[in-house]
Image (spheres, helix red, strand yellow):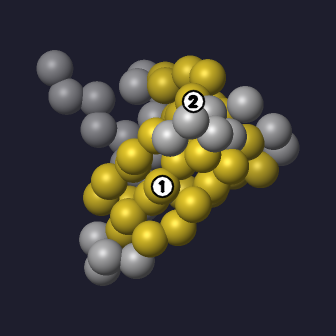
């Protein structure tokens, strides 16, 4: 069954960031490295608390 409802959203506290163009997410000890489809890299502080595939969201703490 395919539940594709669009891009995932990264949630940190009250902030939401669309992962629409993100190709790779690499978890680290205290942060995540995101690499988009163009090769641009960004880092986000936090660790993964929950991945909700049904609602397309990743929650960080």
Give the vertical position of 23 relative to 25 (above or below).
Answer: below
Mark 1, secondary structure of its residue: strand
Q: Earlier in the sequence, mark 1 or mark 2?
A: 1
The residue indicated by pointer 1 is: 33
What residue is rendered at 38% in x and 64% in y? 35
Residue 54's spot in the image, x, y percent?
42, 23
- Outermost residue toward the left? 1
Report whether residue 11 is seen.
no
What residue is rendered at 31% in x and 76% in y? 39
The residue indicated by pointer 2 is: 48
Mark 2, secondary structure of its residue: strand
What residue is rendered at 62% in x and 33% in y? 47
Q: Is residue 43 left or right of residue 15?
A: left
Residue 28's spot in the image, x, y percent?
50, 41
Circle on res. 42: none
Q: Quadrant of residue 43?
A: bottom right
Quarter of the image for the N terminus: give it: top left
What residue is rendered at 53% in x and 67% in y? 42
Quarter of the image for the C terminus: give it: top right
Alpha-carbon distance for marks 1 and 2?
12 Å
Q: Quadrant of residue 46?
A: top right
Q: Is residue 55 left or right of residue 44?
A: left
Report whether residue 12 is seen.
yes
Label 2 near label 1: C-beta < 8 Å?
Answer: no
């Amino acid at each position: 069954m395919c539940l594709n409802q669009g891009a995932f959203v990264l949630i940190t506290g009250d902030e939401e960031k669309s992962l629409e163009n993100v190709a790779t997410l690499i978890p680290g000890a205290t942060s995540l490295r995101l690499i988009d489809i163009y090769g641009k890299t960004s880092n986000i502080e936090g660790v993964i608390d929950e991945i909700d595939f049904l609602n397309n969201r990743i929650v960080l703490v």
